């Protein structure tokens, strides 16, 4: 993951207005983040409970997306679209994001189910249960990490596709 600071984070958002970026509240402990253990950076805005942010590496560029949290949680235990962990110890909620550019200004949005507190990076690094004798746990873990990175980047690419 990239080593980011306040300025580079604010500059990488593709679907936020200047006003929304000026109101952006960085997560507590931002300076102590271990970037080597993150596949993306995600946090909920402590001042605006329905607003959240993700910064996802796409190639060698960091892309930020402003998210809106749904007012209600899914009716049943949902599976996170990004980490796809079936043994989640946490809640999953629906987030929507305006598309970048004219499409977003016209109200076009994209939605996804994601871990409520953006725990995906931790979830995919938890060793999977051994499926059978000879199952390569380390390889399965690496595959889960790569899949998370791909799914998060694909979501962000979908947001900025019309920009």
Image (cartoon, grey):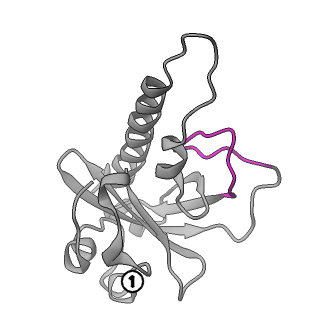
Horizontal arrangement in the rendering, residue 80 relative to residue 153 (left or right): right
Which residue does the image show at 48% across and 42% down from the upper left? 125
Q: Quadrant of residue 72?
A: bottom right
Residue 10, compared with residue 126, is above or below; it is: below
Q: Considering depth in this image, is 46 or 127 the residue closer to the camera?
A: 127
Which residue does the image show at 43% across and 28% down from the upper left? 143
The picture places residue 11, in percent across and down from the top left corner, at 22, 73
Q: Which residues are magenta?
A: 77-92
Q: Quadrant of residue 119?
A: bottom right
Which residue does the image show at 47% across and 34% down from the upper left? 144
- Residue extending farthest to the right is 75
Horizontal arrangement in the rendering, residue 38 relative to residue 91 (left or right): left
Q: Secondary structure at mark 1?
A: loop
- The residue at which mark 1 appears reads as 24
Please state the total of marks drawn on the protein image: 1
Which residue does the image show at 40% across and 31% down from the upper left? 142
Residue 123, compared with residue 72, is above or below; it is: above
The picture places residue 154, in percent across and down from the top left corner, at 39, 42
Q: Quadrant of the C terminus?
A: bottom left
The picture places residue 92, in percent across and down from the top left corner, at 66, 55
The picture places residue 23, in percent across and down from the top left corner, at 39, 88
Q: Considering depth in this image, is 119 or 162 the residue closer to the camera?
A: 119
Majority secondary structure of the magenta segment? loop
- Residue extending farthest to the front is 133
Q: Quadrant of the N terminus?
A: bottom left
Q: Residues within 10 Å of mark 1 (few under 14, many from 20)?
A: many
* Residue 122 magenta-highlighted: no
């Amino acid at each position: 993951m990239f080593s980011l600071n306040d300025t580079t984070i604010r500059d990488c958002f593709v679907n936020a207005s200047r006003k929304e970026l000026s109101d952006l509240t960085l997560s507590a402990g931002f300076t102590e983040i271990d970037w080597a253990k993150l596949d993306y950076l995600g946090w909920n805005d402590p001042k605006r409970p329905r607003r959240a942010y993700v910064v996802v590496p796409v190639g060698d560029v960091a892309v930020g997306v402003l998210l809106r949290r749904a007012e209600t949680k899914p009716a049943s235990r949902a599976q996170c679209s990004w980490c796809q962990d079936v043994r989640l110890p946490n809640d999953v909620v629906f987030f929507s994001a305006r598309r970048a550019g004219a499409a977003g200004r016209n109200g076009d949005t994209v939605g996804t189910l994601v871990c409520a507190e953006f725990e995906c990076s931790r979830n995919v690094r938890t060793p999977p249960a051994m499926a059978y004798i000879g199952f390569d746990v380390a390889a399965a873990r690496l595959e889960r990490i790569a899949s998370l990175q791909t799914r998060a980047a694909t979501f962000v690419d979908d947001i900025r596709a019309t920009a």
